[in-house]
Image: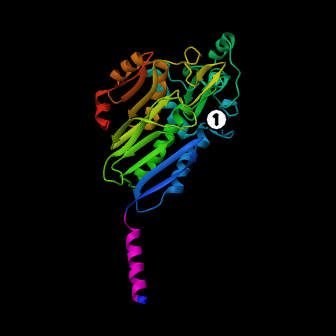
Amino acid sequence: MKACAIFLCAIILCGCGHDVYRYTEGKIYGTYYRVVYESPRVWDKELKDCMEEVNVSLSMFNPESVVSRLNRNETRQVDSLFVRLFRMAQYVNRETDGAFDITVAPLINAWGFGYKQGVMPDSGRIDTLLQWVGMEKLELRGDTLVKMVKETEIDASSIAKGLGVDRVAEFLEKQGVKNYMVDIGGEIRVKGMSGKGRPWRIGIDRPEDDPQVLNRQLQLIISLQNGALATSGNYRNFYVKEGKKYAHTVNPRTGYLVQRDIVSSTVYASTCMEADAYATAFMVLGLEESREIIAAHPELEACFIYTDGQNLKIWMTDRFKTFVLE
């Protein structure tokens, strides 16, 4: 019996040094997260800590976050995560001619999709709020953010989730992990192979109104070995008032909610933060303008599910087509 116990102990100890695929999941940012990674060590706590760092810096729903305190004009001091997000937001804002803008918080709140409960705004109210919106009203000076208009507020929700994904992926890579998939609310970054010895398989939802995700159906399944993917759409976050659908995408240039021909925008990029921002912007811009931007940015790939008024159709870049499984 003693010999058997020693032999069993030896097997267990040897096994501890081997890489195995590990799985962790939970809730964060008002949604779910799932992380699969191959490692001899369990990093679950550290991965959750990475996500929480983004919450502490960028969440509008955390009253003590950097963003919340900036919005209340209690501080000008920012941290490294905010600086990183702000630089990307500035870049995508410029490349999309203002279609992506993190200063939309007053408009988002007014339309009832933000951290404050809004009332349906009239044209006069929108004109007032537009005076506070625009990336040019913010200036980053080192670790200090200067507002040109004190009423300007930041809504980082269209990009912060992507940064959370990147933070987890970067932590794993720093630990030498070569195979992983990070998924936070459908924003995804992958590297290497899955536990089945093949590229990671990711589903893109069919864009049907289903806010509770009770009848999820996939439009496409794609195969990826490296990179990030983000999807934006108007089929989850919306409300109906007096028989009319109001979806959460706000055009920061006009102040009004938009429902363009694109109903689902999926973007592939090297980082999830960049993919997240562009996916949001393309919902504002519509198919033709979005295709022009994609053509000018060969580092991006995209898949747009759009409507011609009657039917759903799909447009995707040539390289994106190579990701799609038959």
Residue behind mark 1: 60
Majority secondary structure of magenta residues: helix
Which residues, given as a range, are shown in magenta? Answer: 3-18
Q: 152 or 36, which lies in front?
A: 36
Residue 171 place in picture, x, y as percent: 45, 50
Q: Is residue 61 above or below residue 3?
A: above
Quadrant of the rendered image containing residue 74:
top right
Q: 86 or 164, which lies in front?
A: 164
Q: Is residue 305 above or below residue 124?
A: below
Residue 12 forms part of the magenta stretch: yes
Identify the residue at image location x=48%, y=23%: 283
- Rate crowding at label 1 as few (under 14), some (14 to 19) or many (20 or more) other CA atoms within 10 Å: many
Residue 300 place in picture, x, y as percent: 36, 29
In the picture, the quarter occupied by the N terminus is bottom left
Residue 23 forms part of the magenta stretch: no
Identify the residue at image location x=55%, y=29%: 140
Residue 281 place in picture, x, y as percent: 48, 24
Is residue 152 in sight in this rendering? Answer: no
* Residue type of the residue flagged with mark 1: Met
Quadrant of the rendered image containing residue 297:
top left
Residue 25 place in picture, x, y as percent: 52, 51
| Scheme by which the image is coloured | rainbow
